Amino acid sequence: MAARPPPAPPARALLLALAGALLAPRAARGVNLGSGFPPSVQGGGAYEVVSASLLNGDPWTPRKNSDSKNHPEELHFRIQLESKELIVKLERNEGLIASSFTETHYQQDGTDVSLIRNYTGHCYYHGHVQGYPGSTVSLSTCSGLRGLITFGNSTYVLEPMKNATNRYKFFPVENLRSTWGACASHSNTSGFVGHHRLPPPSQTRTRHKRETLKMTKYVELVIVADNREFQRQGKDLEKVKQRLIEIANHVDKFYRPLNIRIVLVGVEVWNDIDKCSISQDPFTSLHEFLDWRKMKLLPRKSHDNAQLISGVYFQGTTIGMAPIMSMCTAEQSGGIVMDHSDSPLGAAVTLAHELGHNFGMNHDTLERGCSCKTAADKGGCIMNPSTGYPFPVVFSSCSRKDLEASLEKGMGVCLFNLPEVQPSFGGQKCGNGYVEEGEECDCGEPEECVNLCCNATTCTLKPDAVCAHGLCCENCRVSPPGPRSPLCLAGSTLLQGKQWAGRGPSLPAVGTAILVTQVGSIHLLLLPPSRRGKGTFSR
């Protein structure tokens, strides 16, 4: 275990005590479900040994490199179980890795090294099981097949067997052993998050509630691995990076039903020493990490949220901690996660939980009467205050309501810009949730699309629809100017002879109604068809 840091100076200790006093009223405490943490958490329980083959009968052969062009855009394979045959259909998760994605590690003298690697053709997939409506799959093919398969109201884990070619363990997720633990979430009860006080709900914001809910939101995420995590993974830099991306791939799959996409803009590994004090005290570690993020990470890497994956076993039963309703703030948009399972799935579930707190989600307690489509003995829902096995993989009705309430209050203003993602070797794809050149809209796959203005099959606007996305798009129409919509003005001549400041590096599609700013006043820019495609519009 990591050595404890020396006692904090009196001034620092006083600041931490005052912060604790502010955050304590809404702090959620986990139930003590375990007496301690083992030095290693091993997979256990019964499993079935299976092999994977392509649909033509050839055995599936793993590729060696995580960013190899040999990883196909689509992958269909067969798993033969004792009782049934599964046909798994996968598509590469093209929206997972941003075009600005960087990998950062450190030299012996402490100098940071940031690499820009071409992750086009990467090995992280989402998909479904043929013949099982509502089934979901999130897998990595980087080093064999590893991931999560949900079908028939049950969730299973697929992972490679050691020292065996094309042999895999296939078992129910409840057999994946993990440390029981609890989350301790904190909120700033003063109403301040970062430098900005959340504005009170307004009539305008209420009008846009439905629009913000159906709009796809994008979290530009950085995941950091501390030094103890690096050591626990055998001091293998590539292995740690793959694990972090695999965690993000699972989290993205968990959040897709909420119309939220996770876009990785960076991973960082503290392979020399920790860049801030990470101890067994989760409260202190959280504040140290958030301070480091604000002072060191944000100035060199633009992002919306950062999460620390730690190999340190926190005190008590805490396995994660994050501030509540802090998304997009400079000071508090982040959290810490204990890597408490051999499988990346354990850290993925905890990260999704802590990210949920950043979104304003509270714990699913009995008093709240939350509806969860997964039974407790199958894992329950992600915002359960205590996590053990089986791992939860879905959100409850309470989490959805909490998210709606946070968005209505103005939380998450950074989530509505569309990140640029790594281009696909197979070209653009309708249904990935990203409006690409030639598309008027994109609301995801048909089974997950909730946008009434967009045809999910063709990625075109529905008949009579003028727009499908944007804060100034209401009921498939551009919000008219006037006292009911002071943030949106008619914009047919906004581009004539003027330069405007926007949020993104490229112009959005014609079906997007966006806000642009000129010296403090907010206007609507609705692009005519002739201005579609890429083009700079920053001042």
Image (cartoon, rainbow, N blue to C red):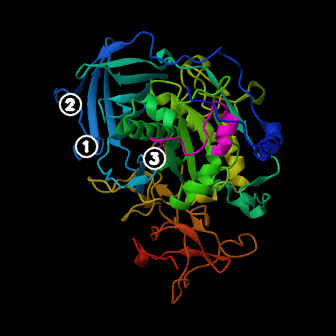
The amino acid beneath tag 1 is: Pro
Residue named by callout 2: 61
* Above/below status of 74 relative to 171: below
Residue most extreme to the top: 46
**Residue closest to the eye, 44 or 397:** 44
Whether residue 297 is situated above or below residue 135 in the rendered picture: below
Give the label on residue 72, or none.
1
Residue range of the region highlighted in magenta in the rendering: 269-288
Residue 349 magenta: no
Q: Name the kind of residue labelled 2 in the image.
A: Thr
Residue 398 seen by the camera: no
Q: Real-space Cα distance between discs 2 and 1?
A: 12 Å
Q: Position of residue 107 (x, y in %)?
A: 41, 48
Left or right placement of residue 201 versus residue 519 in this view: right
* Residue 160 rendering spot, x and y as whole percentages: 32, 23
Q: SS class of the residue under badge 1?
A: loop
Q: Which of pointers 2 and 3 lies earlier in the amino acid sequence?
A: 2
Res. 493 image quadrant? bottom right
Q: How many marks?
A: 3
Across and down, in percent, residue 57 comes to: 17, 26
Q: Nearer the viewer, residue 337 or 482?
A: 337
Please state which of the two labelled residues, at mark 2 or mark 1, is closer to the viewer: 2
Residue drawn at 47 percent across, 60 percent down: 462
Regarding mark 2 in the picture, which secondary structure is present there? Answer: loop
> Which circle, 3 or 1, is nearer the viewer?
3
Please name the residue that numbered disc 3 is placed on.
267
- Asked whether residue 109 is in view, the answer is yes
* Percent x, y of residue 424: 31, 54
Query: Is the N terminus in the top left, top right, bottom left or bottom right quadrant?
Result: top right
Q: Main secondary structure of the magenta part?
A: loop
Q: Is residue 99 left or right of residue 207?
A: left
